[in-house]
Amino acid sequence: MAITIGTLHLPTDKIQEEALKCLPASTYPLYQQERLSLYNAEWENPDLLESCGVALSKAVEVPVLEFYCMDEDIFRLRLWEKGEPKAQCGCSLFDDFSIEEKNIAAFPAAFKVEDPEGRALSALLAAADEDEYRDYLEELSAYFSMPLVPDADIFLSMEEESENYKP
């Protein structure tokens, strides 16, 4: 089953609740392993995801990783700092679509991954460009030591909250 989802991640779990107020109220936080992952069903819209990533990066003192997955055919990662793009990379299974790699070494540096120049991340993304049958969501999550997409329990919680939400 292919999914389209966007998520935001921070390399710390020590974030003031006030900083998260720039995000939609329906955002679901997951604190684990000194990381904070943020999920929101509305972030399947890449423009909304980007605006939330920019806003959050202005509100916190750490980099913000934006992850976007479209039908498990395109993966895009961006790193934001103080509202500015610091790095970008990704992969696509479509021959006519590519994502420009910029400053890939900033990703492992921000998340304390032992890959100083980002070569392992770059190799993982290059392999994903060629092989649609591997589980790259799992491999990318393992690389960053955090779940880039919510598990089934979180998905269910998000669905319940959105069904019960009344503006």
Image (tube, helix red, strand yellow):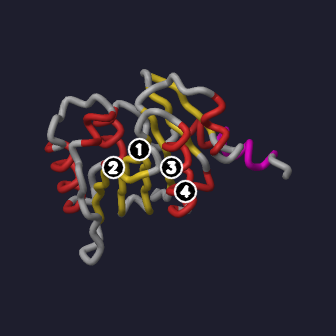
Inter-mark Cα distance, 3 to 4 = 5 Å
Tell me the kind of residue under disc 2.
Lys
Tell me the kind of residue under disc 1.
Glu
Question: Tag 1, which secondary structure?
Answer: strand
| First-in-chain label (2 vs 3) | 3
Span colored in magenta:
156-164
Disc 3 and disc 1 in contact, CB within 8 angstroms:
no
User: Which residue is tagged 1?
Assistant: 81
User: Which residue is tagged 3?
Assistant: 53
Residue 155 location (% of width, % of height)? 60, 43
Tell me the kind of residue under disc 4.
Ser
Q: Give residue 34's quadrant in the image.
A: top left
Question: Tag 2, which secondary structure?
Answer: strand
Inter-mark Cα distance, 4 to 1 = 13 Å
Inter-mark Cα distance, 3 to 1 = 9 Å
Q: Give residue 109's quadrant in the image.
A: top left
Q: Is residue 167 magenta?
A: no
Question: Tag 3, which secondary structure?
Answer: helix
Residue 78 location (% of width, % of height)? 37, 52
| First-in-chain label (3 vs 1) | 3
Q: Nearer the viewer, mark 4 or mark 1?
A: 1
Residue 51, disc: 4
Residue drawn at the location 37% of the way across and 47% of the way down: 79
Tell me the kind of residue under disc 3.
Gly
Residue 54 location (% of width, % of height)? 50, 51
